[in-house]
Image (cartoon, rainbow, N blue to C red):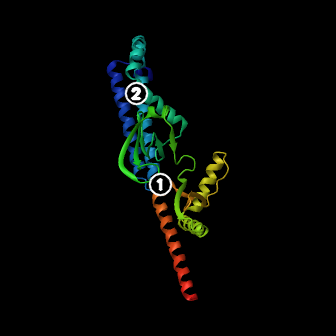
Amino acid sequence: MNLQSFWVGSFATKLVSTTVLIIIVLIIRKYIVHWIKNKETFPPTFKRQWVVRVRNITIFLIFGILVVVWLEQLRTIAASIVVIAAAIVIATKEFLLNVVGFFYRTTTKFVTVGDRIEVNDIRGDVIDQNLMGMTLLEIGPGDKTHQYTGLTIYLPNSLFLSATVKNETFLWSDYVFHLMTIPINADGQWENAEKALLQAARDVSIPYIDKAGKVMKAQALHQNLEEPSIEPRVQIQIAEPERYNMVLRVTVPARKRARLEQDITRRYLQIMQNASETFHQVKATEK
């Protein structure tokens, strides 16, 4: 059987060939996904990304097979398709918007599996995406909390055509600049508090700061941006006549914000407590 007779045969032949090709594609997809999931050296986010990519490629391959095998039949009904096209567009408006949103999101490469995003005040980690939308594990409540709520949210792709999308992990990969505020009394000891907060931030960031610096430097070169400073910084704000706010900017892994903020806060309080105890011991000795 030559290639032409295989593709342009009877209805039964085309039906069998379509079924066989789709089964082959699905079997290949199954083995590829199985191999990815069982590859222990791959990080979880990388696995999720490629499982989703393989699934989407499979969908497009199946669609391509249907078009190629049934091309002659599609040409025959082309005139009828033109007549009912307007009705289809109206009836499938949301579907088409989701498809357009999918291609828009895919071509811009602004959001992918594993990213942490915010759309219309909804924040979460992207765990899946397809032709119709994407699935998030919600984080919140609000933009100051960085813990999973236990809810799963599905966002249609049409949202990406009109809504403002924030990607917290797009620019600096898995690292972000995190801001946290520590209030202090306006009693003239703010310099000591500032030093303690900076020391706490440095102590907590020791395990990852070198790697963060390398990643951010590479991203800055890739994006043609000025290399950012990764060292902790503190700004002093006069919130009220009797209270100052110390605003700390510190480099942290994006998915460990909540835990590291707690670590820094506890380390800061510990340093301040030790300093206070030392001060009182010195005073007692002088007496």
Q: Name the residue located 53 percent from the left edge and 84 percent from the top edge.
A: 281
Which residue type does callout 2 highlight? Answer: Phe
Vertical order, 286 against 270 (above or below):
below
Quadrant hosting residue 245:
bottom right
| Mark 2, secondary structure of its residue | helix
Q: Nearer the viewer, residue 256 or 25?
A: 256
* Disc 1: CA contacts within 10 A as few (<14), some (14-19) or many (>=20): some
| Mark 1, secondary structure of its residue | helix
Vertical order, 230 against 124 (above or below):
below
The reply to whether discs 1 and 2 touch (Cβ–Cβ < 8 Å) is no
The residue sitting at the left extreme is: 12
Disc 2 designates what residue?
95
| Residue 116 as seen in the image, left or right of residue 206 | left
Disc 1 designates what residue?
255
Q: Quick one: label 1 or label 2, which is nearer the N terminus?
A: 2
Q: Position of residue 251 (x, y in %)?
A: 56, 58
Vertical order, 65 against 272 (above or below):
above
Q: Position of residue 4 (x, y in %)?
A: 44, 20
